[in-house]
Image: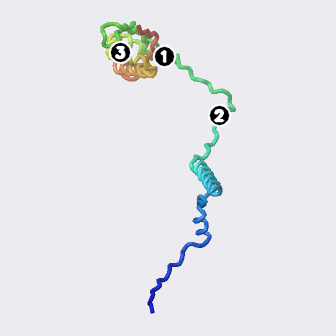
Amino acid sequence: MEFGVQMAKKPDKKPEAEKAEMEVGTAAKPAGGLMGLLMLGGASLVSSFGLVYLLTPPPAAEVAACAPSEAGPAAIAPAANPDQSYVALKEMLITVGSAPATRYLKMNISIITDHEGAGAVASAEPMLLDAFNTYLRSVEMKDFEDPGFYPRMREQLTRRAELVLGSGVSSGVLITEFLLR
């Protein structure tokens, strides 16, 4: 008698349909397919719409650029006041920049004042010319090339006129001639 020990065989865990496919050698279908692409496109479309809808600011109320007026056009106040007087200063000729006398600025300036202040401006003309020359001599050539410089230059000249004449005497500065060579 021979005693043989038989071992139990492990059962197959794969169903038979999968076994048949594996044996035949056919490849498994890729996950997703056309339906997955459609779902991905739909999700992208919905999320894009949500971002645009939620992140755009609300439309501003429409405001007319020029409000219609029932009274007609508004009267514009004149810039030249009849109470003003204009005192012309002597012509100024100034070298510009640090290079030796290659560029010149020729400038005529008038001071805006009232009729009572005209005498004060005339008597302070040497001090005004000195203050203006000191400022204009410190300006570099590159400053004149900037279009935004000219309003700042007018403000600086007005400030210097106020420092020399005192506040209330000068109402501003007019540049009547400006020549840069």
Question: Circle 2 — which element?
Answer: loop
Q: Which residue is mark 1?
A: 84
What residue occupies the far bottom of the structure in this picture? 1
Amino acid type of the residue that numbered disc 1 sits on in the rendered structure: Gln
- Viewer-proximal residue among 179 and 23: 23
Q: Which residue is mark 3?
A: 136
Residue 93: percent from left, percent from top: 37, 7
Kindly check if marks 3 and 2 are in contact, taking CB atoms under 8 A apart as contact. no
What residue occupies the far right of the structure in this picture? 70
Q: CA distance from mark 1 to mark 3?
A: 26 Å
x 65%, y 35%: residue: 64
- Viewer-proximal residue among 46 and 54: 46
In the image, residue 121 sits, relative to residue 77, either above or below, namely: above
User: Who comes first in sequence, dot 1 or dot 2?
Assistant: 2
Residue 168: percent from left, percent from top: 40, 22
Q: Residues within 10 Å of mark 2 (few under 14, many from 20)?
A: few
Question: Circle 3 — which element?
Answer: helix
Q: Which residue is mark 2?
A: 67
Q: Quadrant of residue 5?
A: bottom left
